[in-house]
Image (tube, grey):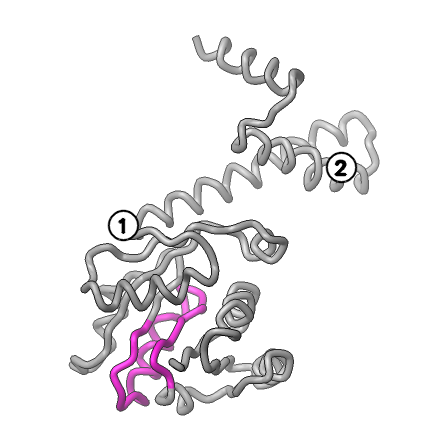
């Protein structure tokens, strides 16, 4: 059985670790030892706050924010003596920038696997799409695909598209929530009802739209919107 390590035990990292746990020997690493220990106790796996344990891993999933990724990869690669696959899931972290930190180590395979999905929704059962860098060698791509097939639907392609998709979706989603809140506050609707309207009515309507399952009221809104664009 292969050993997979998840570095970074935040919302996405902990979710991925839970998905990988039953199919691989698992190691979880977080700079906060309490966080790593809590997750490792839950999953009955090895947990640590040290990168030293990563030399045991065949695949290392980097579930870290973009702003700390370069320094983290630099420190991690200094510890490695094996030839693992490093998987970069940070939406805006560039493989090119990360590879510059390898200190001429040629035995490390780096690949991007970018997730179109929200960690909270994924925990509720929403299945994400994972785009894996289609330019990498077949062996590395297949290893990453096998791993992330435990999480969602895997496709090979241009991972740079994910940054645009996630950015636009997040921005427009927040703007919509703010507009709903503003309109309803003007009508003296209590905030607790507004919050429910955003996460239930608005989010549910958006999901129904993508599934082609909208009702007559929503259809009239679409028709009016399309007519306003003419």
Quadrant for the C terminus, please: top left
Tell me if 3 is positioned left or right of 208 in this view. left
* 51 is higher (above) or lower (below) than 24: below
The x and y percentages for residue 188 are: 83, 29
The x and y percentages for residue 26 are: 48, 80
Quadrant for the N terminus, please: bottom left
* 51 is higher (above) or lower (below) than 151: below
Q: At 26% across and 70% down in the image, what residue appears?
A: 110
The x and y percentages for residue 66 are: 40, 64
* 180 is higher (above) or lower (below) than 18: above
The x and y percentages for residue 132 are: 31, 57
Give the class, few, some or many, for how many residues have Cα within 10 Å of label 1's Cα (few <14, many ≥20).
some
Tell me if 184 is positioned left or right of 155 in this view. right
Residues drawn in magenta: 57-86
Q: At 63% across and 54% down in the image, what residue appears?
A: 124
Q: Considering the numbered disc 2 on the image, is that residue within a helix, a strand or a loop?
A: helix
Q: Which residue is mark 2?
A: 194
Looking at the rendered image, the disc whose residue lies closer to the viewer, 2 or 1, is: 1
The dot on residue 157 is 1
Q: At 76% across and 31% down in the image, what residue appears?
A: 185
N-terminal of the pair, mark 2 or mark 1, is: 1
Tell me if 201 is positioned left or right of 110 in this view. right
Per the image, is 157 magenta? no
């Amino acid at each position: 059985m292969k050993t997979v390590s998840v570095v970074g035990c935040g919302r996405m990292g902990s979710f991925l670790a839970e998905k990988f746990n039953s199919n691989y020997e698992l190691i979880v690493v977080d700079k906060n030892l309490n966080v790593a220990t809590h997750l490792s106790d839950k999953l009955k796996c090895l947990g640590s706050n040290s990168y030293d344990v990563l030399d045991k891993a065949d695949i290392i999933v980097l579930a870290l924010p973009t702003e700390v990724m370069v320094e983290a990869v630099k420190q991690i690669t200094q510890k490695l003596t094996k030839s693992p696959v490093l998987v970069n899931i940070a939406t805006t972290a560039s493989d090119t920038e990360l590879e510059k930190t390898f200190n001429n180590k040629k035995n490390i395979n780096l690949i991007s696997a970018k997730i179109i999905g929200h960690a909270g929704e994924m925990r509720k059962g929403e299945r994400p799409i994972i785009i894996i860098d289609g330019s990498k060698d077949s062996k590395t791509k297949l290893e990453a695909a096998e791993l992330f097939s435990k999480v969602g639907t895997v496709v090979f392609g241009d991972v740079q598209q994910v940054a645009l998709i996630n950015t636009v979706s997040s921005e427009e989603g927040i703007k919509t929530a703010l507009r709903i809140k503003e309109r309803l506050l003007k009508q003296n609707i209590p905030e607790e009802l507004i919050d429910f309207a955003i996460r239930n009515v608005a989010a549910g309507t958006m999901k129904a739209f993508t599934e082609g399952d909208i009702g007559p009221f929503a259809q009239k809104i679409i028709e009016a919107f399309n007519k306003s664009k003419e």
